[in-house]
Amino acid sequence: MNANILLYKITLLLYFAATILYLVDVIARRQQAGRVGRWLLVGGLVTHLAAVAARYMVAGHAPVVNLNESLSFFALALVVIYLLFDLKYRLTILGAFCCPLALAMMIFGAAAGPVSTANPALDSWWFPVHITLAFAGYAVFTLAAAAGVMYLMQERMLKSKRFSGLYYRLPSLDVLDSINYKCLTFGFPLMTMGIISGAVWANSAWGGYWRWDPKETWALITWFLYAALLHGRLTIGWRGRRAAIFAIIGFLCLLFTFLGVNVMMSDLHSFNALEGR
């Protein structure tokens, strides 16, 4: 068994155990379970980083060429960003949203199959810069969407005055809105730099900065959505429910940009093109 495959399986097990413990903490209110789950998640991150590094050594390029590698890298970025936010907020319930999502990405990635021969365009050092910035932005906006979902759930319970056990584990609306705003202020520059570095990479690989292929078009649409949200928050004072809904819509658009375009459409950014098929 290859080292990266073994490390991938170990990561899956650690993420699975962390997911169970996070859910036990939230559902059964066992805080010790959440603390242990956090350490298991950190352990999973270490093995995940090792698996990505091992894959890089084998492939010779940043391992985000096919669906398997891309979902794995997305999960890695999500875990890193969540743990960084967790240093300040210590919100187990946010981990109970993010950890299962990272686990699901890893499981679906494992079922997607191995990579084939890669495109020579990936030899540019702009490629790892581009994908690192892009996936970091994706991960931050995933956190923003999770905070948005929690905001809408809590707001609905407050308005209906029907409080489930989950209500008492949710942070306040102000804290959730603050997380949403911080994610936007971190994620938008990352997305912007990801698009710029992608344009530079495209110019070095294909001789043009922008070709208006489906991936680039949808990336620009997603960028404008988040730009509108940032503008609304800074100048009009958008907060609360509207900002939460925008964060969720932006994330759905981001998911389509990442998965829908790559899987359903054929362009220079599709997985088949990157694999050199």
Image: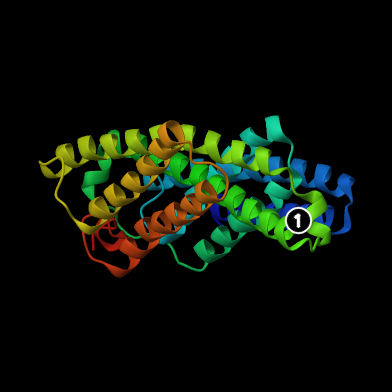
Q: Residues within 10 Å of mark 1 (few under 14, many from 20)?
A: some
Looking at the image, which residue is at 74% across and 44% down?
171
Looking at the image, which residue is at 16% across and 37% down?
204
Q: x, y percentage for residue 126?
A: 28, 34
Query: Which of 60/154 is in front?
Result: 154
Residue 32 image-quadrant placement: top right
Looking at the image, which residue is at 82% across and 51% down?
168
Query: Which of 274/265 is in front?
Result: 265
Name the residue tied to disc 1: 17
**Left or right side of 74 for 171:** right
Element on which disc 1 rests: helix
Q: x, y percentage for residue 260?
A: 36, 64
Dot 1 amino acid type: Ala
The reply to whether residue 178 is in sight is yes
**Left or right side of 99 for 262:** left
Q: x, y percentage for residue 165?
A: 84, 59
The reply to whether residue 133 is in sight is no
Looking at the image, which residue is at 56% across and 50% down?
241
Residue 105 image-quadrant placement: bottom right
- Looking at the image, is 188 positioned above or below residue 64? above
Q: x, y percentage for residue 128?
A: 36, 38
Total number of numbered discs in the rendering: 1
Query: Which of 218/242 is in front?
Result: 242
**Left or right side of 122 for 168:** right
